[in-house]
Every structure is written in C-alpha cells, then in structure tokens.
Amino acid sequence: MDRKDTLTEEDLEIAAVTGGSMPLPIPGRITRLFPAFAHRNYQLYFFGQSISLVGFWLQQVAIGWLVFELTHSALWVGIAFAAGGLPFLLFSAFAGVFIDKTDKQRLIIWTQIGEATIALILGLIVLNGLASLPLVLFLAFLSGMVGSIDLPARLAFLIEMVGRDDLASATGINVGVFNAARFVGPALAGLLIASFGVGWAFILNGVSFLPPIMALLKIRPIYRSSPAADQHPIESLKEGLAFVFHNEKLLFFMLLASAMAIFVWPYQSLMPVVAEKVFSSGPAGLGTLLSATGAGSLAGAVFTSSRSRQKNNIKPIFVGILVAGVSLVAFSFNYDFGLAHVLLFAAGFGVIVSVSLLNTMVQLSAPDQMRGRIMAVYLTMFVGMMPLGNSLLGAIAERTSILFSIRLGALVMLIASSWIYFKKASSWQ
C-alpha cells in the first residue's frame, strides 16, 4: 500500500501540529521517494541547511588555503584541520549531557549564531591583514567546539521535526545534501578566492547561516521530549555511557560506525594521491573521481530515503558495507580510469547506505530523554575517529602503496562486519 493511502497516528499528529501548511507543494511521487519532504518542518530545515552547507565547504577550502599562505607547509594545513576536528573527540560526549537538558531548537539557533560569528571574525581579520597562524588555529578549534555541540543537537532534533516513521528519510537526505554541497562549495570557493581573496570566503560562510537560522525560527516540532532528570553532569554522562555499553545492539552500531570511520571513510581523502600516482590524471581527473563518489552517495541517499518506513533496516546496513568493501577491494586492483569511476560510484553508494542507516538505528534505539547523549557518543566514535583513520591509512600508504592501504582498510571492514553480522546481528529485529 502506498504511503499516501496510509495514515498513522503519527501522521495525524503531524497534520494537527503543522496545520498542513507547506512552504513548497511537492508532488506525491517525490514524497514517496523522500517522505521527509512531506513535512513542513523538514522542508524549512532542508532549504536552510542546503545553503549553509555550501558555506561550510567554502570555509573548509578557505582554512586550508589561508594556513598554506601563512606557512607554506602541508603539515600545518593538516594541523589546522585537526584543530577543527579534535573537539568532536574531546567534547561531544560531554555536550550530549547539556543537549538532553535544554530546548534543542533554541540551542541549535545559538550554535548557528556562534558559528556565523566565528566565520565573520575570520573574514574580518583576513581582510584587515591581522591573520596569524595561532589566531587562525584558535578560531578553528573554537569553531570545532561549537560544532561538537551543534551536530549532535541537530541529529537529536531531527526526530522532533519529522517523527520516527520518516527519520530514516530525513537522515538519508541530510547525508545526500552534505555530499552534494561538497562539490558545489569547493568549486565556488576556488572562484571566490581567486577573484576576491580568501577573506570573502569566510564572510560568505558567515552570511550563509542566516537562512537556516530563519528556518529554525519557523519550525514547529511535532513533540518535545521532556528534559533529562536534573542530576550532576558526570552522573548524567555515566548514565548515557552505561546505556550504550549495556545495550548490545547499540554498542555494536557504535563499533561499526567507528570501524567505518577508521577503515573505509579515509579512501575519499586519499583520492588526490590516487589521481596523481595511479592514474596520472591531475586535478581534472581528481574532480571526476570525486564526482563519481558523490553520485554514488546521492544514489545511496535516495535508496535510504525510499525505504524509510521499512521496519527492519539492519540487513541493509551490512549490505551497504559489503557493497562498499567489495567495490574498494576491486578498485585497489584496478588501473583502468573508466572502470575506477564505476567502482567509486558503488563504493559511495554502499558507504552512504550503511552510514545513514546506522545513524537512524542509533537514534531509534535511544530513549527520548537520552537521545542527545547517545548521539554525542555516536559522533565521538564516528566523526572523532576520522582523523585516526586518515592518519592510519595514510601512514600505511607511505610504507606500502596507496592502493594497498585502501585494500587493507576495506578487507578489515569486510571481515569485522561479517563477524558482527553472523555472530550477532543476524538475530536482531
């Protein structure tokens, strides 16, 4: 039976809260593929975040370019990105305690204002010739601290916007638009930096936060979970960690996410080396290889969204890992440039399916009053592990070869996920 023919109790509650008002009428054939777009709340959120994510990638390129201009050192460029990523490892779990005790919608508005302010400060110090390496590193770290609160809060807020039934759809779309913005943002950043200077990339990123802030002010949540019990922050954190470690399914979801971050996700950051050393294709070839990955990611987002109301999404997580792992192993033996694009499309598809559904299953496994803490732990084990994965596979590539490094990571992931599936996950419902 089609979604439009089935009204659940949740659908009726959503209609009552939102009054059926939609910023943009969307045809039924679209909402059947992307059920989250049937929600007024998610339409507002999506349009705001689509603009802001382009700004995010503007700033990512601008930070690297600015630090290289200041130091002419690839090492310091890496350190600058590490400074922005380190707070996710250090603070996300603690941020979850705070997120569970506050109004998530209001908190996200303030974190967006904070990130916009930092971007504008970066732009102004560059335009006024005041940029220095210590100051840029400090502001990158500060932005990462705000992000370590903002991201788990936004993930925990998704279910309050669209409900449980369409959470998988919203998650899949989020991952898809993030990857789409990855190709628009850097290209725009290159034009902007070349034409007007690096400072204006930061300024434009700061301005890009206005649409999501305005959208957030108009969102009417379907429900708000009651704040967590008033207890000492350390006790609250221990309660969240204990829930994770005593829930076998949730714990293995977290471990799978960590393994993906360490052994599979880094293949994307290694593509510049592959383009140059394996295919001798230069920047143009790198662009097409990354575009193939991005196209696969978007296809994965469509697939994930289209099955958002399926009750059991555990098997597709492992199918996604299988597709990604096998594709990357095949890629590591391949020297044909055309075939490389097909294999990277498949890898991008598998990675996004598994990561999107892992995100969804973690959220659905979390009690309402603990969702902020659970998502914060998840991000610590996923986003926080990415620098480790990049460093590990990069070091292996230095000692062996870039293709062997990608192959080894994929094989480790395939073996680990196979063990988890046949020993544990095959019995989960």
Image (cartoon, helix red, strand yellow):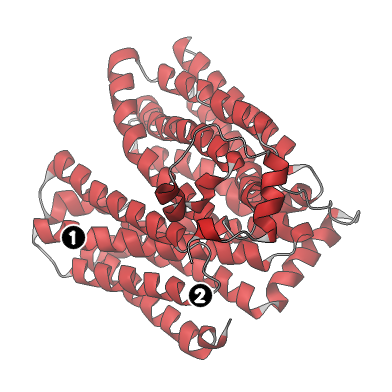
Residue 34 placement (x, y as % from top left): 46, 51
Q: Label 2 vs label 1: CA separation? A: 26 Å
Q: Are marks 2 and 1 in contact (CB under 8 Å)?
A: no
Local packing at callout 1 (Cα closer than 10 Å; few below 14, some 14-19, many 20+) is some
Is residue 394 visible to us here?
no
As helix, strand or loop, the secondary structure at mark 1 comes to helix
Residue 172 placement (x, y as % from top left): 47, 54
Q: Is residue 248 left or right of residue 309?
A: right
Disc 2 marks a residue whose amino acid type is Ile
Q: Identify the image quadrant of residue 260.
A: bottom left
**In this rendering, is residue 147 above or below 415?**
above
As helix, strand or loop, the secondary structure at mark 2 comes to helix
Residue placed most toward the observer, 240 or 10: 10
Is residue 281 visible to us here?
yes
Q: Which residue is identified by label 1?
A: 342
Q: Which residue is identified by label 2?
A: 314
Residue 110 placement (x, y as % from top left): 69, 31
- Of the 4 image quadrants, the one containing the C terminus is bottom right
**Residue at 43% across / 75% down in the picture?**
318
Disc 1 marks a residue whose amino acid type is Val
Q: Identify the image quadrant of residue 389.
A: bottom left
Residue placed most toward the observer, 54 or 200: 54
**In this rendering, is residue 324 above or below 174?**
below
